[in-house]
Each structure stands twice: as structure tokens, then as C-alpha cells.
Image (cartoon, helix red, strand yellow):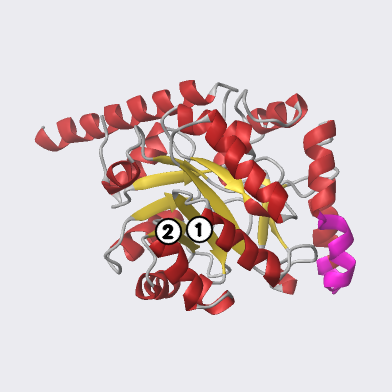
Amino acid sequence: MIQTKITEMFDIEYPIICGAMMWICKPELCAAISNAGGMGNITAAIYKTEEEFRGALRKTRELTDKPFTVNITLLPSINITPEHHKMYLTVCAEEKVPALEISGAPIDKACGMEYIDMLKKAGVKLFHKVGSVRHAMHAEKAGYDGIFAAGIEEGGHPLNDDVTTMLLTPRIVESVNIPVVTTGGIANGKTMAAALMLGADAVMMASRFMATRECDIHQNIKDELVKRQERDTTLICKSVNLQGRALINETTNAVLDVESKGGGLEKIIPLITGDKCLKAWETGDVDVAPMMVGQSIGLIHEVTTCKELLASMAAEAEAEISKLHGKLIA
């Protein structure tokens, strides 16, 4: 069995964490992943009021007694205000959630150092998702407990430094003294083994969890992910400093067309609203939204349960590490 600083920190079976996914990371999927031996995720931006958010955390605890993480994205948004950010952080401290996945700006810059102090006093472990060494070093200095090293392969919004997981993970590992978790391009045991060999203490993935039976999205979307390959994603919104990796479809092609003609954010926003993604997940229309998935979709070959996925990943990772050991001895 693979034991790392992360499995010891949270007392979990597998060093596998679910990344944030808008409209998807809700209590049911979160609990399924945690109950399977990993760490599930509650994505805060799904919930617009304190009552709804606190209710989601408490429902998760009803469904699992295992650790889970909460994503809070500290970036400007149409619907999520700076007051929402502070509310999410405060509720997480009050509810003593096990860990936070912070994306975007660091807590100390976006909300103030007092929020880091509050969370640490509550025993909440703080992890910042970054795409560069400089941001990882700032997080460590600010008091974070760990880093999610996000390579350009990831779905969602990778940093426009465009550094791959293969390079980013060891660079951050050698630059900080806190645990590092690799995200971007992770979807099976082989990629998990590679991340561990690069010095990571765990892996984070999101796209792969979309193709699980417990994930509450339309079967058409899951089938599409199995069918698509690693070349079937593209980077959009680079021209407006909102770089995102999404599945190539009618919507992403439309966004790229607007960008190629010099169109600004006001012309792009109607194409990428969160409501469109919700419609895609519910109806199975693979062209209606910019579905934020990573290049790891090329490694998704079937829809499984979360339990089957995590167990098979761990077994494959162990086998690959043993195989490498045998080659080195030979």
C-alpha cells in the first residue's frame, strides 16, 4: 500500500484527491470518493448563500465520516463576490472542514491574513493550487500546509506560464518544504506512479471522476469523454487573460472565433456562462458549453465506480513502481 505525507496527514487509504468541478462536486460524489478511500471535493461556488453552503457541508458529513476537501476559487466573478469568498472561508472554519483547495489569488492577498489565522486555528489544512514555483513559495510563506502543482494539461484554468506537469512537479518539490500534490494529466495508476516518482505526495484529478457512475451528469457526457482523445481539448480565453482548457466543441470553436477577430470579454461571456455548463451536464448536449476537461481524457477508457477506480489506480501504481524497481536492479 502506498503511504505518503498526504495519506498520513488525512488518514486516508489512497493519495488521490478530487479537484473542483462546477455543478458536479456536490455531497453525493464527494462522499462516494471519500468512502472509496480518497478525498472528495465540495466546490463552494455552486452555493450562493451561507445556508446552502453550510447545508452541503453537513450533508456531506451525513454521507461520509471520511475526510474531504472544499474548493474556494478567489477570482473575480459575475455571481461570486468578495463577500462570498469571506463567507465560504468563515463557514469552513466554523464547520472545521478537513482541507481547502484554494484556486486563484492566495487567501492573504484576497481576503487578509486574518482568514489564514482563523482557518489554521480551526485545524483546517490549506492547499493552494498553483502553476508556478513563485506562487508555491508565496503560499508556503503565507502559512499554507501544501501545494497543488497544476500543469498546463489540466482542465479548467491553468496558469498562463504554460508549464507541464512533468517539469512543474519536481520544480515545486525542490523549492518548498511542504507536501506537493500533482494535478494535470492524471487519470490512471501509471500517471499516479509518475507523479510520485517526481516527488509528489499525492495526485489530484477531476476529469477522470466525471466518468464514474456516481457522478451526476448525463450519460452522453460520460460517453463523450470515453470517446475523445488527448488532442480533443483546446485553450480558450487567452486573449482576455482568462485562459481555460476545455473540450473542443461548437462552443469552444465559437469562443476561438471571437478571439481571432479581436472580440473582447463582453462578447465571450455569453458563450461561457456557468448556466451553459449546468445545461450540458443535465441534458447531455456536448456542444452547448465550454466543458472544462483536461488532456487526461485520452486516458479515460471506461465508466467505473469510484471504488473500482481508486482501487485499480493504486494497484496499477504499485505495480508500475515495482516494475521500475526490478528494471533498476537488472
The percent position of residue 192, horizontal first and vertical second, equals: 38, 39
Question: In this orientation, does residue 231 appear?
Answer: no
Position of 17 compared to 62: left or right? left
Position of 323 compared to 184: left or right? left
Above or below, comparing residue 40 to residue 53 in the picture: above
Disc 2 secondary structure class: loop
Amino acid type at circle 2 is Ala
- Image quadrant where one finds the N terminus: top left
Identify the residue under disc 1: 93
Q: Earlier in the sequence, mark 1 or mark 2?
A: 1
Residue in the foreground of this view, choosing between 91 and 254: 91
Q: Residues within 10 Å of mark 1 (few under 14, many from 20)?
A: many
The number of discs equals 2
Q: Is residue 27 magenta?
A: no
Above or below, comparing residue 65 to residue 231 in the picture: above
Report the magenta residues as a range: 259-273
Q: Main secondary structure of the magenta part?
A: helix
Residue at 39% across, 56% down:
123
Amino acid type at circle 1 is Ala
Identify the residue under disc 2: 122
Residue in the foreground of this view, choosing between 250 and 315: 315
Position of 4 compared to 122: left or right? left
